[in-house]
Image: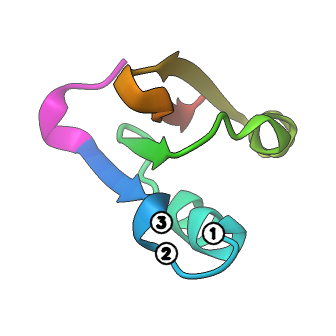
Amino acid sequence: MATESTERTLDVREIDGPPFDDIVAALADLEPDHRLRLIAPFEPEPLYEVLDDRGFVHESEERDGGVWHVLIEHA
């Protein structure tokens, strides 16, 4: 995984409506040596197949309060 200085955070809890377009836009801007930390109020399982199809890998972790952190980077 990349270092902390190359990590961007997208907290979809702050987005009104479906966050999919915001996530796709963030992935499009993701540099090859950077990673994206996605924070969601649920496990974004439908996103995992999209990530795989687009050449990304991810690590998911459920934290306190049922909040999910998903680290995403280029495969």
Q: Secondary structure at mark 2?
A: loop
**At 32% across and 51% down in the image, what residue appears?**
9
Q: Quadrant of residue 74?
A: top right
Question: What residue is disc 2 on?
Answer: 15
Q: Residue furthest left?
A: 5
Query: Residue 29: which disc?
Result: 3
Q: Earlier in the sequence, mark 3 or mark 1?
A: 1
Q: Badge 2, how many Cα within 10 Å: few under 14, some, many 20+? A: few
- Measured as percent of width and height from the top left, residue 69 is found at 44, 32
Question: What residue is disc 1 on?
Answer: 19
Q: CA distance from mark 3 to mark 2?
A: 18 Å
Q: Secondary structure at mark 3?
A: loop
In the rendered structure, which segment of residues is drawn in magenta?
1-6
**At 49% across and 18% down in the image, what residue appears?**
61
> Relative to the observer, which residue lies in front, 10 or 4?
10
Residues at marks 2 and 1 touching, judged by CB atoms closer than 8 Å: yes
**At 54% across and 82% down in the image, what residue appears?**
16
Q: Quadrant of residue 7?
A: top left
Q: CA distance from mark 3 to mark 1?
A: 16 Å
Q: CA distance from mark 2 to mark 1?
A: 6 Å
Q: Badge 1, how many Cα within 10 Å: few under 14, some, many 20+? A: some
Query: Residue 73: which disc?
Result: none
Single out the mark in the foreground, 3 or 2.
Answer: 2
